[in-house]
Amino acid sequence: MTLRVDGTTYTLGVDTRTTLLDALRERLGITSPKKGCDHGQCGACTILLDGWRSNSCLALAVAHDGAEITTAAGLAVDGTLHPMQEAFVECDAFQCGYCTPGQIVSAVGMLDEVDSGWPSAVTAAGDVEVVLDEAEIRERMSGNICRCAAYANIVPAIARVARR
Amino acid sequence: MRPLRYARAQDVPQAVRMLAEAPYGAYLAGGTNLVDLMKLGVATPELLVDVRRLTSERIEDLPDGGILVGAAVRNSELAADPTIRTRYPVLSQALLAGASGQLRNLATTGGNLLQRTRCPYFQNITTPCNKRVPGTGCSALDGHQRDLAILGASPECVATHPSDMAVALAALDAVVRTRGPDGDRSIPVTELHRLPGEEPGRDTVLRHGELIIDVELPPLGFAANSRYRKVRDRASYAFALVSVAAAVDVVDGVVRDVRLALGGVAHKPWRASRAEDLLRGAPAIEHSFAEAADAELAAARPLPGNAFKVPLARAVIIRTLLDLTADLAEDGR
């Protein structure tokens, strides 16, 4: 099977039971997506899978032959940080850093969803335009857990990018 | 995880044939629940037939004013669809109340309906569970009961169905269309899931190899005035303790028609038919809503650890109906 990860195409053979997360980390040495709970509950493994933010720990690799994947590491271009990465550094939006790649790539995917006009559970019924306030950011990012509880700085970091 | 064959079919008929010939096979769509259960050792398929690209990913208008939702439509896309948000807001709100943004992007309409209970004893292969291994007993009866059923349970099983989407679909009289080894059939969502009875291992009436093709939403004008309200142990990304899907049509202060379903309380999405019967023709006031809730919950048989769900369900039913009818009053209708 082939995977295109952060702009590079890889050809590999995998056991049918291998998840995308394990294929990336153990087979291709791409360690930006992290293994936290391995059950889709913590979001540390989040990638953009054909553009959709997804838990790579619950996706079987064989089912995604030919997929286009973006990890947090792939957001930087030629050594220049992505605005979301810059904002996380500027806002000190992490402590241990283990959840950070998942947080960053999830936040980038989340802002795309907002740009598409997608509502969330806290968007008022009938609202066409989403106002990305703190309640919206917290709801939309609830699939990414930070056990250091750096949320107080993660939310402002995402809000900073959203305002640009 | 046990060794596994993976196959991709050319089309639906081939997928149905492949699974019919594999008694220990399963369909794979988004995988968000199935892959998790495989890691836990709860699901042990020998063959996965990937159907993610086989069924429709489209949301289409039907000539009768209803909507057809392809089985492969992602939960996130269905929730964001402008037509669904306008004409069936309860469905969009139910989807957005479930899971996380990442999971909703992977999970499909068909798969959401077929997800399995999150009862901790079902998910833990070291504890007895009649649903997982028939005849071993129910650990929940002497265990952690906060998330378990208060309606329609049996001595064999007190698990709840975890889907929010299915509660909205049950309220909307949605119909699941399937194709199986014995042909096509249409099953109302209210009849898709089973009560546990003596066979808790069977979540639904689907036969082995029967594949969900799409879900039909019948036209229901007053569904534009509908709402999903979910109560859970944290503000986001948790399963329901109790949820309510409701749609109400009020004319001159009287309930002309109503749809009401409960989540988090039973082995299936619980259509509150008894409450609906009492509400039709009743004045749209709190007293009517309370009487209807009491009538529906009279059949509740809670466990010591989830008795709080009975007054909670009553309160959420009343609050949801009040919110819906207050909106009508404000609109001057």
Image: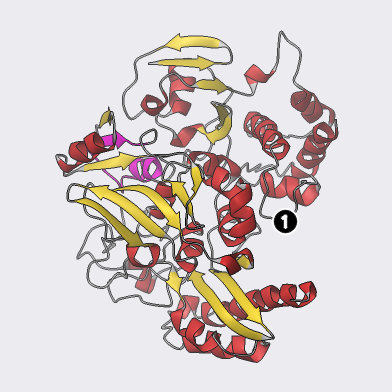
Residue A141: image location, x then y, percent: 67, 43
Depth order, front residue of B104/B223: B223
Q: Which residues are magenta?
A: B34-51
Residue B164: image location, x then y, percent: 51, 59
The residue lying at 71 percent from left, 12 percent from top is A77
Name the kind of residue labelled 1 in the image.
Answer: Gly
From this view, report whether residue A74 is shown above or below residue A59.
above
Pick the quarter of the image with the N terminus of chain B.
top left
Residue A135: image location, x then y, percent: 76, 51
At label 1, counting other C-alpha atoms closer than 10 Å, the crowd grade (few under 14, some 14-19, many 20 or more) is few
Mark 1: secondary structure: loop
The residue lying at 39 percent from left, 62 percent from top is B189
Image quarter of residue A7: top right
Q: Is residue B50 magenta?
A: yes
- Chain under callout 1: A
> In the orientation shown, which residue stands out farthest toward the front?
B63
The residue lying at 19 percent from left, 36 percent from top is B18
From this view, report whether residue B21 is shown above or below residue B117.
above
Residue B166: image location, x then y, percent: 46, 60
Left or right for B187, reference A111 = left
Left or right for B203, reference B245 = left
Pick the quarter of the image with the C terminus of chain B.
bottom right
Q: Is residue A44 magenta?
A: no
Image quarter of residue B121: bottom left
From this view, report whether residue B81 is shown above or below residue B201.
above
Left or right for B133, reference B110 = left
Q: What residue did someone put label 1 on?
A: A126
Q: Is residue A96 visible?
A: no
